Image (spheres, grey):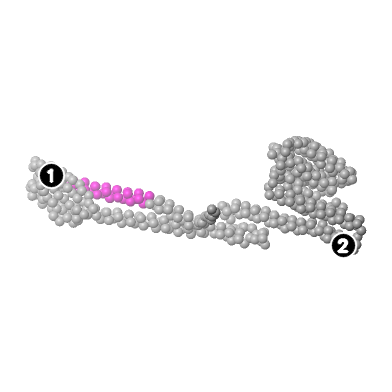
Amino acid sequence: MSSQAMPSTVPCAYSIGRRLSILLAIQTVIGLGVLLAFIYGATTMLFTDKHEEELRGYSAVLVDVVRDADAKGGEAEIKAKLAWLAERRPGTFVQVQRADGSELYRDKAPTFDVTTSVSRTMPFTVEPVSGAGPLQGTVILDCTQDAKTIKRMALLLIAAVLAGAALVGWGTFWRVRCSLRPLIDLAGQTKAIDARRLGQRLTLAEPVEELQPLIDQFNGLMNRVERTYEQLEGFNADVAHELRTPLTNLIGHTEVALSRERSVGELEDTLHSNLEELHRMAAIVNDMLFLAQADRGVKARRGAAVSLAQLVQQVVEFHEAPMEERGLTVSIEGDTRLSIDEPLVKRALSNLLGNAIRYADTGTNLCVRIARESGDSVRLWVENTGPSIEPEHLPRLFDRFFRADASRCELEKPHHGLGLSIVAAIARMHDGFPAAESSGGTTRVGFSLHAA
């Protein structure tokens, strides 16, 4: 039973401005809500205290009036006085009961519905002067208007919270859009960069402190991309040039050999010449494949620790013939043991020695220096005496197919310009780096190696 692959889900993009607006609006609602809720609660407490104070004051007045009226004329006087007060205190309702529970007095026409309106009640007790049982009274205060005021205030506060949140949200969205304008400009500039405009860089009319590191990093990346692109174009052109020469020679020799009948010896000479050109092409292709592997991050296969001086001596013995031909001698200074990839290091040293032999003055001494540096790093230098390399050429000395001076190449022993590039690749495969110095007729080219 075959299973069907589930489609991958791509997260949806979100708007920074919209998200910030919503978050700040929520924070505004919470903040203003808490603040205005506190204001509402404080106002309600003030109204409650006001009602309590008013009821206490009116109850005290009623107690004094009932006591005085009882002293002057008994229950009739009490009823008259309470009726007279009721006319002058709208918004209140008073009733008084005797000690046995019977009704002594009740306001006839209250200005509010006692049963349905918002009100507050406070009981009071009066000890009659006549010595009868205590009178129990109740005063009710109409709070309907204050309740409506508090309700309107609550609605106003809620509206203020919502309006404030909406204002903050809209203001934040507008402000964020204005603040993100530099990012929009950078996006437009980035979109305009293509293979024909690699030299274009990101800039802002008004520098932004938070964006400047990003701009610098991107421009630095574009510098490396542009340099790599130029190197790639140059590398392609150099590869085509280097391969064109042996191909042209092969075609020419073959066409000449086929132009008329040749003897076996002449055909053998042509085949030998073609074989040399094929070997040269194979060497270029193999070196290019090796550099491609190094560029992909392949690391050296390290073996047991070996003496670097003995390794150098083996390479020197391989180059004895060309050195004797030019009357050169070699001295080896320093030694250390290190775990390395022997074939690769030998290849790098062979390229350095071959380069030094090619450009050293006749009859001079070559010096190979081995020095342990800080930590686990080891530096190998190959030093020769001869024409100095111009300072502007030193940074490009390890570039592929780069020749500081084409006139210095020996026509009888041509080389295709990848030797020092391979040295740099081998150094990187050992977590090291190449280096070159040249001044006063002395040139030192080498590389560093790091312990595994």
Residue visible at 76% across and 50% down in the picture:
287
| Mark sitting earlier along the chain (1/2) | 1
Q: Is disc 2 surrounded by few (<14), some (14 to 19) or many (20+) residues within 10 Å?
A: few
The image shows residue 384 at horizontal and vertical percentages of 83, 44
- Residues 46 and 11: in front is 11
Question: Mark 1 — residue?
Answer: 135
* Residue shown at the point (15%, 56%) measured from the top left: 109
User: Whole-percent x and y of residue 358?
Assistant: 84, 48
Residue type pointed to by label 1: Leu
Residue 363 makes an appearance in the image: no
Q: Is residue 103 left or right of residue 25?
A: left
Q: Are marks 1 and 2 in contact (CB under 8 Å)?
A: no
Residue type pointed to by label 2: Leu
Q: Quadrant of the C terminus?
A: top right
* Horizontal side, residue 209 vs residue 228: left or right: left
Q: Is residue 99 a member of the stretch shown in magenta?
A: no
Q: Which element type, helix, strand or loop, lies under badge 1?
A: strand
Q: Is residue 68 above or below residue 8?
A: above
Crowd class of label 1 (few under 14; some 14 to 19; many from 20; radius 10 Å): many
> Residue 412 vs residue 67: left or right?
right
Which structural element holds mark 2? helix
Asked if the stretch drawn in magenta spans residue 50, the answer is yes
Q: Nearer the viewer, mark 1 or mark 2?
A: 2
Magenta stretch prevailing secondary structure: helix
Quick one: 224 or 135, which is closer to the camera? Answer: 224
The magenta segment: 34-61
In the image, residue 258 above or below residue 40:
below
Mark identifier at residue 258: 2
- Apparent side of residue 233 relative to residue 354 in the rendered image (left or right): left
